[in-house]
């Protein structure tokens, strides 16, 4: 049955229901956005407590070879901070970069 077959009171109720659903969807989207922001902030704070990872640490952590980590660096997928002869990485930044490029265990570059 389309809305054209409803009486005026039913149409008003239907329209109010649609407005209510839109408000609920808007509020849920807003809550999700706030939750994501809070989660990112929490991860940043947690990340600040972790020591930076070396290339070997990354290879071990992500179960890939050092060559794969070097490949990610050369392709610009991840960046780190150079310190002396070494390069060091923030674990959360690496995770975000790999997520952005959809790297999973199944499709990692070897």
Image: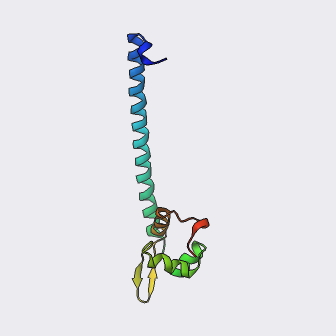
Q: In percent of the image, x 46 and y 62: which residue is there? A: 100
Image height of 11 relative to 100, above or below: above
Percent across and percent down for residue 46 are: 47, 64
Name the residue located 43 percent from the left edge and 36 percent from the top edge: 25
From where the camera sits, is residue 53 visible? no
Q: Residue at x 55, y 73 (%)?
A: 109
Q: Judge from the rendering whether residue 1 lies leftward or rightward of residue 30; answer left or right.
A: right
How many numbered discs, if any? 0
Q: Which of the 4 image quarters holds residue 30?
A: top left
Where in the figure is residue 63, as x and y percent of width and height?
A: 61, 73
Seen in the picture, residue 18 relative to 5 is either above or below; the reply is below
Res. 17 visible in picture: yes
Q: Is 14 rendered above or below residue 45?
A: above
The x and y percentages for residue 52 are 47, 76
Residue 11 or residue 80, whichever sits in front: 11
Q: Would you say 29 lies left or right of 64 here?
A: left
Q: How is the image coloured?
A: rainbow
Q: Is residue 47 above or below residue 74?
A: above
Location of the C terminus (image quadrant) = bottom right
Identity of the residue furthest to the bottom in this view: 85
Q: Residue at x 50, y 80 (%)?
A: 70
């Amino acid at each position: 049955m389309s809305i054209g077959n409803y009486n005026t009171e039913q149409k008003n109720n239907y329209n109010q229901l649609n407005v209510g659903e839109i408000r609920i969807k808007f509020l849920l989207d807003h809550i999700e956005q706030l939750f994501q922001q809070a989660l990112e902030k929490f991860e940043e704070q947690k990340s600040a407590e972790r020591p930076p990872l070396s290339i070997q640490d990354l290879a071990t952590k992500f179960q890939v070879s050092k060559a794969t980590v070097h490949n990610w660096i050369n392709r610009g997928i991840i960046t780190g901070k150079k310190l002396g002869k070494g390069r060091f990485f923030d674990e959360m930044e690496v995770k975000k970069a790999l997520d952005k490029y959809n790297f999973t265990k199944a499709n990692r570059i070897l």
